[in-house]
Amino acid sequence: MNRVCLILAMYLPTASSPADEIISFNRHIRPILAENCFACHGFDPKHREAGLRLDTFAGATDDRDGVRAVMPGDLEKSELWARIQSDDPDLLMPPPSSHKPALSPAQRALIKKWIEQGAKYETHWAFVPPVRPPVKHDGPAAIDYFITQKLGEAGLAMSPEAAPEQLLRRVSLDLIGLPPTPDEADEFLKAYRQDADAAYRAAVERLLAGPHYGERWGRWWLDQARYADSNGYSIDAPRQIWKYRDWVIGALNADMPFDRFTVEQLAGDLLPGAEESQKIATGFHRNTQINQEGGIDKEQFRIDSVFDRVATTGTVWLGLTIGCAQCHDHKFDPIEQKEYYRLFAFLNNQDEPTLKVFDPGVDVSGLTSEFKKLEAEIAAYMKDHAEELAQWESGLTPEIKKSLSSTIVKALAVPVKKRSFAQQRTLFAGGIGGVGEFRQLNDRYAELDVVLNQGVSTMVLRELPTPRKTTVYIKGDFTRPGEEVGPGTPAVLHPLERPTGRPTRLDLAKWLVSPRNPLTARVLMNRVWQQYFGRGIVETENDYGMQGTAPSHPELLDWLAVEFMSKRWSLKEMHRLIVTSRTYRQSSSTRPELRAKDPNNYLLARQQRLRLDAEVVRDVALAASGLLSTKVGGPPVYPPIPDGVMGQGQVKRVWAVSQGADRYRRGLYTFVYRASPPPSLTVFDAPEGFNTCTRRIRSNTPLQALTLMNDAGYFEFAGALEKLIRKDGLAAAFRRCTTRTPTLDELAVLERLDTLTAARVLLNLDETITRE
Amino acid sequence: MIPMNSEITLRDVTRRHFFSRCSLGIGSIALSSLLAKEGRAVAAAPTHRRNPLEPKAGHFPAKAKNVIFLFMAGGPSQLDLFEHKPKLTELNGRPIPESYTAGKRFAFMDSSHRSNLLATRRTFKQHGKSGAWVSDLLPYTAGIVDLISIVTTCKTELFNHAPAKLYMNTGSGQFGRPSMGSWITYGLGSECDDLPGFVVLQSGPRGPRGGAVLWGSGVLPTTYQGVPLRNQGDPIVNLSTPQAIDPARQRQLVDAVRELNLKRLQVTGDDEISTRINAYEMAYRMQTSAPELMDTSDESQATLDLYGIKNPRESSFARNCLLARRLVERGVRFVQLYDTNWDHHGGPTENLKKHLPEKCRDIDQPCAALVRDLKQRGLLDDTIVVWGGEFGRTPMGEVRESTGRNHHIDAFTMWFAGGGFKAGQVYGKTDEFGFGAVENPVHVHDVHATILRQLGIDHERLSVRSQGLDFRLTGVDPAKVVKDLLT
């Protein structure tokens, strides 16, 4: 079964009577041609067979010695038609050597009708800017309108609203990644009985306004930003870039408009009078790996990271597989290799420094001058008292030396004239200057040294004064430079606007969020939708090109995209819209009718049960057991991990387990080494930050069971939950995990167990780690 | 049949729905009997394959079922082990003719890389009926040359460790691609229902460069990623029941979780719950079967002696070879052994004179024993054994504290045994210095294609769609099945 059949299967129930149906190129024909023909008869001239291209009307209808692949309106004169149903393996298309099966009767029927109807081509839907569909409805009702319409065509209706407990748990997990507390649930249920709608809306507002919203959706963005805390490759040294992570959380909590969110991350350093936070934001493209292996050619890996930046930009904002054009013209989409390197040219002119970041209250310039003054005073003091030090030193017996610290002993071993400033300070502090004036100067100096030089740093981008030369690389090989190119954007999309001179990253960023861009708003809204329903309206959420799937609800996607832009790119507005729709609020349980007509829930006659994301699996267990630390932001933490897992890579890394509340921080704060990521997260499909991740796979494996049953962390959580069982009873503990009250049957199962086993059972339930 | 061109999306779930109606596996049988015991049926009968590792047929009849890949991490020196090059000795210290190296790039170009030829210290002899050359460092391997195919013309693309390891494992230097073991378990499932289908064992002073990504599943579900079996502590992370819990209480836990999950399944009708029920059953079985696997006390002294295992409790490459045999005996599809520190540049802890012989002593006897042991137990016909590293080493010397050899990608040696690979041949021919192939080059992608072919998989048809492309292990450029290597 190939994917085209699946797409057709999806449309067939809703198609009107086939006899008089108008065939749409984008909807019906392009998927067939893209899957079966474009690889050899598409955009890429180097791999084009027989010089024939079928991706344009001109190409398909070109007169080739009296033969045309497609003769509009005339089936008999259309060679394409003859070839797709030939019995002769030498003539049949797609050829048997391509391993593609012959077209199905349904596909052939569509092509037949399309040719008969005049073989009209349309611009690929994703390259046409979205227009607000003419609907009477507004707000969440518009969403429901589009969904209900499709359901109606299939003879289906929406499911009833989910039970209130389930609804509250769902929206809490979706908006903040935490389950409701028992108190929140009680309050909600009370209010819900009085006015369900008002209660629900109030809950949504509370969640959107709270500090945890930025954590939940921040992690969504960090997946796309390929964030992790180490350099990757073989050495995989730790790095400091968590200020960028905190910037993302803060920006989302403040509902920074997505266009500004984009500009600051891609080019914050180029904004006039760039502030520190805008520089921190450029960490987005510093989340590439750094190879520190011996014997490498550094330029090779710098270029690799630029390749990654181009591909990531293309995927995250445009939903296009631009990276495919690194080595050759794109095989399916209208992107030339040269255009790829034009985009590359935007991202090739940076050096990659770290930025010292100070707490807001720190007077950096004042302290720096004080530091310099102290340094001079200390130097003067040491010069004046050099003789005293020498005397002290000559009086040191081996006995005394034994009692001195190793740093002092080391400094003593250095000849007097070769001692560094730091070594001299050490000797003065440990020898004659342990009290009085020197001590005062030195202590303050050491204090400022910590504040100014050993504080937090974060990785950022900085534009070079003179741009690097960018060329096409033949076959993507950096040792084979070709034609030189300047910065520019692909011709198939809207033009780049720039005042004068050479365009910069800032122009690129603005171009990405231009209202004329047909892709960004759609791509982002689709990715938001995917979080809520487990699948995007465009299922191939990272490919809007010819090989991507057509949207299941094209009008809804366009409506959301236009709405997003008109609401000043506010993500919170869009979350509010979606989660208050009836579509979202439906029950997720299936019913026999749906199993028969739409088993995969493309049409959304119900919500979808979704296994929680890796970090949230942990967060729910922490919250249920009452251990969760709700602190937002700060350096990554080291919760307990199983013995021996840090030895998977070349360099065995230390994992100094965090103490106190930091043991119980939310999953997104756990330190991630790319080469030896924390097993309890990766086992639930957390990405390791090697490249952009726009959708997590949801696997369902025995290793997940072993983690929840036996991991020392989860066992500890179970211990805490057991205490709550003893205090508040089994039903209360069940509610902490699932928000609902257990049935008598369910309670009976738990009552047969000792309390610790009952607590472990609760943390292992499918329902506990699922958002229903 | 292997799913083709599937988008790994929810459509993968879709696919499971489509394909599974005809193949109800062990898992679903177990579930229906559970339901029968409960005396009720689910609201709507679940239809999808509940065990993603259920065995599947390939594209062709398979010649082999399992793979054991003995990975010498760091790049073993073929010129001191398998490649007998008298010319190298004759011209020791002279520069290699420029025609060989023009336009080539090497690691450490800006520091220790040199272009003078380096003679081997080893003595070479021909062995067996095949007359294969093997140096004095591998006496046991010399004893099995008539059971293996030695390929001297292997070729790869990348000359730094982590990228090259990635290439040997995933067919690409880019991150995010599935490893060979993942591809194979994805394509064929596993015949073992109480151990993972793809298992990784490690020896040597540290983990391999690149780490977990080498056995990662990339764009495939994590179900198919390699599971490291550890020699210390729990063999699998979190395998042991917490200390305070006795087996009876653990069983109670599993039973109660199943019972409550079944109730939820009846309410929601979500097939994922039945998959989870099966996952818990398998996890529980693993808790017994993995320790049984690791406990080698049922092996005879003769077997331990064959592998050269002195202390069966101590972690070593030799013990890992024995475990590899025990794993394929149990139906585990893909076993990969990493032995680290084969990077003999000439540094203080990595020279050809002292350290290469030490490494060879660690692995020579066990590798040969594994092949012999599999053969005597009738498992060699079904099992492909692969020996090799991510690349080889240069004919030119590298100068650090002492001399060594640099990374080399144009020609290096691997060997293959069992699973329909010819026994007793040396394949490929390199030039007088062993720099490049003059006959029959075998690219890494060809190695992959050939291994897949023996398992019954067409490497061009085992693909998965991501980002609009059909990814496959052997990449986009044509790769070939090396028929000459096969019986």
Image: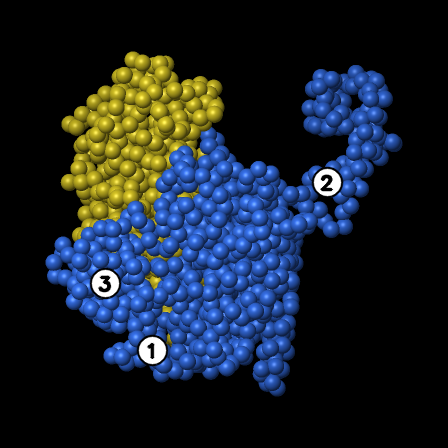
Kindly give the residue lying farthest to the right in the view shown.
A436
Residue B477 or residue A516, whichever sits in front: A516
Query: Given the image, on which type of amino acid does mark 2 rest?
Result: Leu
The residue located at (80%, 26%) in the rendering is A379
On the image, numbered disc 2 is attached to which residue? Answer: A452
The amino acid type, in three-letter code, at marker 3 is: Val
Quadrant (top left/top right/bottom left/bottom right) for the N terminus of chain B: bottom left
Q: CA distance from mark 1 to mark 3?
A: 28 Å
| Chain letter tied to yellow | B
- Disc on the earlier residue, 1 or 2: 1
Label whose residue precedes the other's in the sequence (1 or 3): 1
Q: How is the image coloured?
A: by chain
Looking at the image, residue B418 sits to the left or right of residue A207; the answer is: left
| Residue A481 sits in quarter | top left
Task: In the picture, one chain is blue; tell me its letter.
Answer: A
Give the chain letter at badge 3: A
Question: Is residue A397 visible in the rendered structure shown here?
Answer: yes
- Vertical side of B18 occupied by B297: above or below: above
- Amino acid type assigned to the residue bearing label 1 in the image: Thr
